[in-house]
Structure formats: C-alpha cells, structure tokens
Amino acid sequence: MCDVGNPGHHSSLEVINPPNNKVMNWFARILAHYSCVVLLVVAVFAGSCLIVPLIFMKTPDFSDPQMGFEARGTTLAQRSTAWKNLLDAAGSSGQLTVNPRRIKQPQYNVSQNVISNGYGSQETSTILAPNMTALDNLPEDVTGVVRTGVSSIPGDTESTPTWVYALNTSEVFQGSNDTDRNRKVDPIAVLKEMLNSGINPLDHDHNHQHISSDGFFCSSPSAGYSRVVFSATGGGDLFTLDSILSMCHIEAQMIASEEYHTICESTSHEKCCHSWSLGNYIAFLHNRPSCFAVTSEDVDATKALLQMCSHYYHNLTLTPDCQEESLWFCKQVPQQCRQHNAVYNIMYYLVDANFLPPNNCCISSLVNTMLILPIARSSATLAYYHSLDLHALQHGNVEVVAMDFGLKSTLFHECLVQDTWMIGAGGTFVLVCMWLYTGSLFVTIMTVIAVAFSLGMSYFMYTVIFELHFFPFMNLLATIVAVGIGADDAFIFCKVWRYVKAEKNSGISVELVHDALKHATPSMFVTSLTTASAFYASYISSITAIRCFRLHK
C-alpha cells in the first residue's frame, strides 16, 4: 500500500500540498483538537442506544434455546402447525369450542394439559390450581372431576397433585370407573374438608396406590411417559427368548439407578410401577413374577396370540375401549384379544409397524421394540438421563438405540451453556493477539469499548428501528464476530498510523490524522463490506434464527 523502504523518493503516504478534501480535513481537525469531546459524544450516544431498548423494550428471553430452529416449509412442520392450531381452536376459549360458558377466575391459575383417560388415549382438560386461602370465594358454578394424589398426567413437568375440573358439565363426579362416575361429590366440600384436616392438596404424595384393574401395571401406556427403543445389533429377531431376557437385563440395569426411584410412578414407598415392555407383558399374560421367568413356550404363545388378534387391530375393531365391552363392534373381537388391553398396547406402543403388517399372514421379524418407563417426560429426568449416559446399555444381541425422556430442549440448553467457554476463549485469544500486535493495552481496551458501542447501536436498530421482537440465542454469536471484525480494523489503522507518523516525524497534528484516515478508511471499508456481504447473503436462508443473526450483524 505504501513505499517506505527506499529513501531516495517520496513515500506514497507523503502529502506535500494541503488536503483538498474539505470534509475529511474538517473531520480530521475535530479529531485532532477535540478528541475527548468526540469520545464523550460517542459514548453518550452509544450508551443511550443500548439503554433505551433495555428499558423500554422487552428483554430477550432465552428460556427456549431452540427458538428459531424449528423446521419450516416441510410436510411434517406444516402438519405440526395445523395440529397446534386445531388444539388452540378447540380449547376452552377457542373458535371451535363446544363449551360456550367461559368462567373468569382471577384467583386461579388456568392452563391446558393433556391427561390420560385410562385407556391409552388422551383428552384435554382445564387445570386449576386453587387458592387455598380463599375457599369460601370459590365460584358455585365450577364443577368437574376431582383427582387427588400425585399427578399421573403424562408429560406433566412437575409431579404435583392435579385438580381437574370439566367446566362444561353440570354435575360433579369422582373416580374413573362406572361405579364411581355415578357418585356425585361437592368439590368445594372436599377442598374445605382437606384444609380443615391439615391436608394440603398441593403437597406431593409419592406413596399413593394407583394399581390398575389388571393388578400388574399402574395404568395404560401413553406418549407422555419416557421411552427407550431396543434394537438387535445384527438385525436379528427380538421376539425370541434370548432377546427378551437380554432386554430384561438392560431394563433391570436402567431401573437400578437411584435417580430412577426418585422420579418413578410408584405403588408403595419402595416399589416403582412396572414398566411397559414386551417381556413384562409376556410375564403378565402367563402369570410369571417377572420377565426373567418367561419361557420359550410363553414367547411362542404370545406371538401366536398377536398373530391371531392382529387382524382385529388393523381393521380398527380392537380399540382400547374394548376392555369394557361397551362398544358394539368390540363384541366381534375374541375375549383373549381384549383382555387387559394387552394385545392393543403391544401392537400400538411396543412393536414396530413392520411386525405383523396388515394383509400379511406371516410373522415378520421384530427389528425394534419399545420400553415405556413409568416416569413422565420432563426436565426432572435430566439427572437420570446422565446416569444412564455413563453406562453401555447393551446385553447380548440387544442394544438401546434411542431414548425420549422429554429432554430435547433441556439438553440443547445445557449444551449451549457448556459451550460458552468457547466464546470466552475465542474472545480472549483475539484480545491477547491485539495486545501483542499493537503493544498498547489502552488501544486494546478502547477497541473492545468500540465493539461494545457498535453492538449497542446494532441492538437499538434491531429492536427500535426495525421493530424486530424475535431475538434468538444465536444472535449472541454476533459478539465474537464483532470482536474479530473490530480487531481487523484496529490492526489496519494501527499499521497505517505508524507509517504516517514515521513519515511525518512529528506529534499529532491535523495533517497526520488526515493522512491516517485517508489511507486507512478505504481498507477498513472494504474489509467490513466484504464481511457484511457474506453475512447478508445468508439472509435468504429459510432458517429464521440464521436470517435474524445476519440482520443483527
């Protein structure tokens, strides 16, 4: 850019005549004579740009670290969006609601939860957390089903007692079977009686009894419970005695963890509910104490039962409601296919779709099978997941290939937090390099302050000028990118400043500042422009987080 090695002729940085650019000369004169004032004005302006959005705008919320990374434009994403919109429209205040009565209760915390109806399907109910200090003010028209004890709601993030009220009914029922449904109760009286007896219905009772009618499992499996997928290592058949026993060994290893017994759905103080697995269902159907006691005859008999009943499952006559024989089409299903919903639960939840397919008389190999643990899918399973992650979950020809504990967002957030040290390490490395190159700690600190000011003004334009309220976690990476770009500009200006000062061989003057800006500005502008162009080119991305990150930069 300049010639400083040959003393026989003038350097290209040497300016003989006064500069003709009046604007550049005026700006250089202000910087040379009023540098402190310029710094103060810039600090006040940049600080105001940062303070204004932090005070008057909503603070960025990073509670959902996956925000912006949702798939868009795909068939699955469109179906998921349509399903969510349908649930919202069918809610208590939605456009498609069948309940025109809308009760406004400021003393209640109302939310929507998915509860199990006891037969594997799910329904939406309104959850009310009553204010126990204002029982006398409870509205008289609030009616519904009262359930006490630990919440058995699959997918509930907290193991707390649940009070479920069906707001569109005129009578109050308690219980889950036909006999209990015919018994009316007064929820207000129940709440007052519990409060007067010193029982808080919001307290957690881990030792309640809730064995289902079959006497083996606690309830029916559902998608709200944690799931584990088994697969054969060599692609063999899992519906054999050796594979069943191998899966039993892995299950025993999983439930032996101390963390498991603190979060499992239990029947007594020391015993967790049985998990829903192929081995446990075989043991249950043949009165074995555990899956370790099943025999090859039990396995063959269960396989034959599934083959016989698969026809009724695929033509939709075998449903979870057939256990009570309340539907007319269930009468054509044999009794052994309806008993305890065992066949339905195995076909619907535990075996893969390729096992006993429709219109196929032959039994195909069972490649994958599922284990459903009696623990809700929530962030409470994080410690238990980490304890399993330390062991190799494999026995014989069976291994665990997938898990779903409802920890997708939690693990994503945990990985982001754990990777923050990389951000700090990268920024520290850049600052150390800048300090070593410039040889001045003051210049390094001022460069960092300048980068902070630029980020503040960028955030002001992002939130106030462009009025963008979507601020994903990925936008924080702009800090490291800005430090890198600011370091490049600082390197360029320091290098040019040294050359110009060596040529002038004088102190700071208007001409020195002018020449430094004249030669450094084009280089700094070109480097910043090319970097910005590369970032803005990604604005056409269909990923919202990437688009907002490019705009933020």
Image (cartoon, rainbow, N blue to C red):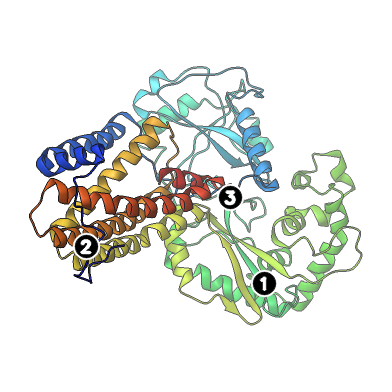
Q: Disc 1 designates what residue?
A: 231
> What amino acid type is highlighted by mark number 2?
His
Tag 2's secondary structure?
loop
Position of residue 337 in the picture relative to residue 200 (left or right)? right
Residue 119 location, x and y as percent? 69, 46
> What amino acid type is highlighted by mark number 1?
Ser
Position of residue 482 in the picture relative to residue 395 (left or right)? left
Residue at position x 47%, y 18% in the image: 139
Q: Give the class, few, some or many, for how many residues have Cα within 10 Å of label 1's Cα (few <14, many ≥20).
A: many
Residue 197's image quarter?
top left
- Quick one: 329 or 109, which is closer to the camera? 109
Residue at position x 15%, y 39% in the image: 30
Q: Disc 2 designates what residue?
A: 10
> What amino acid type is highlighted by mark number 3?
Gly
C-alpha separation, residue under disc 3 versus residue under disc 2? 80 Å
> What residue occupies the far bottom of the structure in this picture?
396
Nearer the observer: mark 3 or 2; the answer is 2
Tag 1's secondary structure?
strand
Residue 428 location, x and y as percent? 26, 63
Q: Earlier in the sequence, mark 3 or mark 2?
A: 2
